[in-house]
Image: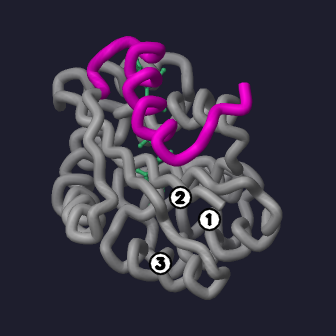
Amino acid sequence: MFNLVLFGPPGSGKGTQSENIVKTYNLEHISTGDLLRSEVSRATPLGVEAQKYMDQGLLVPDEVVIGMISSKIDESADARGFIFDGFPRTRAQAEALDKLLEFKNTKIDLVLALDVSEAELTKRLIGRGLTSGRSDDTEDVIVKRIKEYRSKTEPVASYYDAHGKLETVQGNHPVEETFKLLSKNINKYLLPVA
Ligand code: B4P
């Protein structure tokens, strides 16, 4: 099993690149953003709780997100591997993920961090907001999301760096070009299937 974390600020292209990676390497995609938005749209108790945070550009509490991940991993026990998109976003989530995977006799193999300038992030998210209808793609919420990223999520990179798992990839390029850079790193561990 090969497990990859795709790491980066809001709008860095985690969701976009995950689609390409899933198709090329046949990995199971786990996006906490997508899972949370699905709970919100179905107005489940978890979704109602999560929406309060997401609408303000804040991270949803760790225990909510960690519980969701655990059941999602169990659903795909036979997978070739997982791509974790937008998770972990705090050190507590990173430690919880390590414990969960250890319990399942596996581990995180590689963390690919997308490096994108703040001006480009803002431009992309405002652009997406024109059509996405997402309540967190407005200018004032985007500023809060980037701030939340800098204070709570960015430190997670050092956690993985200390474990020798972190590779940083320039993500300012067009989608296909960034994908080539990501693939170069993944190919050291796993052969493409497509
Ligand atoms: P997420 O759904 O994870 O979303 P994201 O950070 O906005 O986006 P991503 O990096 O995937 O960007 P994308 O490819 O879409 O999080 C949303 C919220 O959910 C969080 O703020 C938080 O509240 C909550 N949440 C999620 N996970 C959590 C966790 N683990 N713990 C706590 N809370 C959690 O790209 C963005 C735009 O850029 C798109 O329009 C795309 O088309 C464009 N784009 C992408 N790559 C491009 C490129 N190379 N060139 C030009 N445009 C590009």
- Compare marks 3 and 2 and give the one earlier in the sequence: 2
What residue is rendered at 48% in x and 30% in y? Answer: 183
The residue positioned 29% from the left and 34% from the top of the image is: 169
Callout 1 touching callout 2 (CB < 8 Å): yes
Pointer 3 or 1: first along the chain: 1
Query: For mark 3, what is the residue?
Result: 98
Compute the Cα span from label 1 to label 2. Answer: 5 Å
Q: Is residue 175 magenta?
A: yes
The answer to whether residue 152 shows anywhere in this view is: no
Instruction: Estimate how packed mark 2 is, as few (under 14), some (14 to 19) or many (20 or more) residues with alpha carbons within 10 Å.
Output: many
In the depicted structure, whether residue 178 falls above or below residue 33: above
Q: Which mark is residue 51?
A: 2
Of badges 3 and 2, nearer the viewer stands 3
Type of residue at label 3?
Asp
Callout 1 amino acid: Val
Measuring 29% from the left and 54% from the top, which residue is drawn there?
166
Q: Work out whether 67 lies above or below 51.
A: below
Image quadrant where residue 139 sits? top left
Instruction: Give the label on residue 187, or none.
Output: none
Report ligand 1 position as a quadrant.
Answer: top left
Image quadrant containing the C terminus: top right
**Disc 2 residue type (three-letter):** Gln
Magenta residues span 171-194
Asked if 190 appears above or below 115 in the picture, the reply is: below
**Residue 79 location, x and y as percent?**
77, 57
Q: Position of residue 1 (x, y in %)?
A: 66, 61
Q: Residue at x 72, y 40 (%)?
A: 26
Give the side of residue 186 with respect to residue 78, left or right: left
